[in-house]
Image (tube, rainbow, N blue to C red):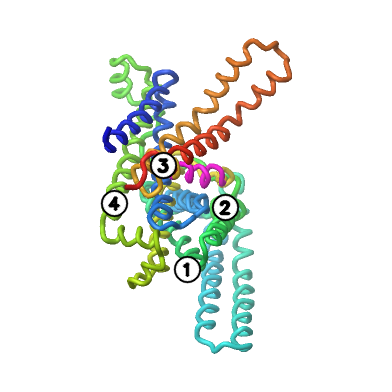
Amino acid sequence: MTERTKNGLLFVLVFSLIASTGFTDSWNVALGIFNMGLISAIMALGVNMQWGYAGLFNVGVMGFVALGGLGAVIVSMPPVNDAWAAGGIGIMIGLALGALTIVGAIKYYTWAKPGLARTLGVLAILIVGFALYRTFFDPAKAAVEAVSPATTGYLGGLGLPIILSWPVGGALAAGAAWIVGKTALGLRSDYLAIATLGIAEIIIAILKNEDWLARGVKNVIGLPRPVPYEIDLQNDPAFVERVTNLGYDPVIASSITVKLAYSALFLAVLLALLWASQAALKSPWGRMMRAIRDNETAAEAMGKDVTKRHLQIFILGSFVCGLAGAMMTTLDGQLTPGTYQPLRFTFLVWVMVIVGGSGNNFGAILGGFLIWFLWVMVEPYGLALIELITAGMPDGSALKDHLLDSAAHMRLLTMGVILLLVLRFSPRGLIPER
């Protein structure tokens, strides 16, 4: 069997598993898995760029995905005019003063001669700037969050089409990656991992606590859609007549139609990213990145700026993760900062890359679909298996109750077992790098 045939059969197997859910459960569930599989594959592509191309160990994926979700809110939600009138200008002035303070301190540090005077000057700039920042920002923030806190209490967004938020979410993640990269990419890989994890937790903490930005843990709901609403399709006589003549229930047909529309959008983005990633990987730039990954010392001896290239690929991979985060928030229709957990948005994405095959874009995509399918379906499958095993045990048995209660942990057990099996029998992944 050739390598291409084997890889094709792996994709056929994964998509057959997803399709089987449509036949045994419902096509709504199958399409829901497929859509989140597309988004997960895009996240895996972003991490694969960083790790598979350049060997950068980023465990802060969660933060970059969350910034993509924030981009969806900032771009698509309508502005809250009362909040802007109450304190929007003050918040903008405060943020500008904070940014100027940081820039001023950095500029003075690079300009002044080393010594006590430079240290005192930097401290003076930071203290005065921080005081000015809080003078403008704090009262404005309190005024904004006091405007209808049950429904708004934040500044809102720009009211633009939500598809425009996808590249904006990627740009926010790329900007954060530039800041992280400028300070951490010169460190060893383990220190880079600690730095990215810390930055991700800081981003989530800001999203949870700064209500003026995106309502914090009160969540932003009702984001606009790039596709029709189900209720609008159900109220469309032409749509109802068409699906009724085909023998389908209009309610179910409307839900499937919306999910298919999302699938078309997400698939177009995934294919465009795959094409660009493959072209980059096969180019001289891609060969240079892999040379740097395999031997940084030899690459430096050939005149390559390793730190600069690491920063470049770190920003590109983070952009893709932010793009996926904006797409996921669009699909959910809401931003819920409390749901961004390292297990889901860092560990699981890394499992997708490792199982699929790091350094191979097709492997990352395969891992995204396979691991997401298992993450969703293992728990109901596990519960059915445990019910079958314990069928002969008497009701009320402590062992039976314990086993049934443990079904919720089948996800974590399965992920661990799959990871161990792949690392043991195919350590380079299901579709390894050529």
Q: Is residue 211 left or right of residue 70?
A: right
Mark-to-mark CA distance, 4 and 1: 25 Å
* Label 1 crowd bin: few (<14), some (14–19), many (20+), radius 10 Å: few
Residue 276 in view here:
yes
x%, y% of residue 409? 61, 31
In magenta stretch: residue 345:
yes
x%, y% of residue 318? 43, 55
* Label 3 crowd bin: few (<14), some (14–19), many (20+), radius 10 Å: many
Mark-to-mark CA distance, 3 and 2: 31 Å
Mark-to-mark CA distance, 4 and 2: 30 Å
Which of label 1 and label 3 is nearer to you?
3
Location of mark 1 (residue): 182
Looking at the image, which residue is at 54% across and 72% down?
A: 97
Viewer-side residue, 95 vs 35: 35
Viewer-side residue, 165 vs 224: 165
Which numbered tag is attached to residue 276? 4
Q: Which mark sits nearer the N-terminus, 4 or 1?
A: 1
| Secondary-structure class at tag 4 | helix
Residues at marks 3 and 4 touching, judged by CB atoms closer than 8 Å: no
Which numbered tag is attached to residue 319? none
Location of mark 2 (residue): 204
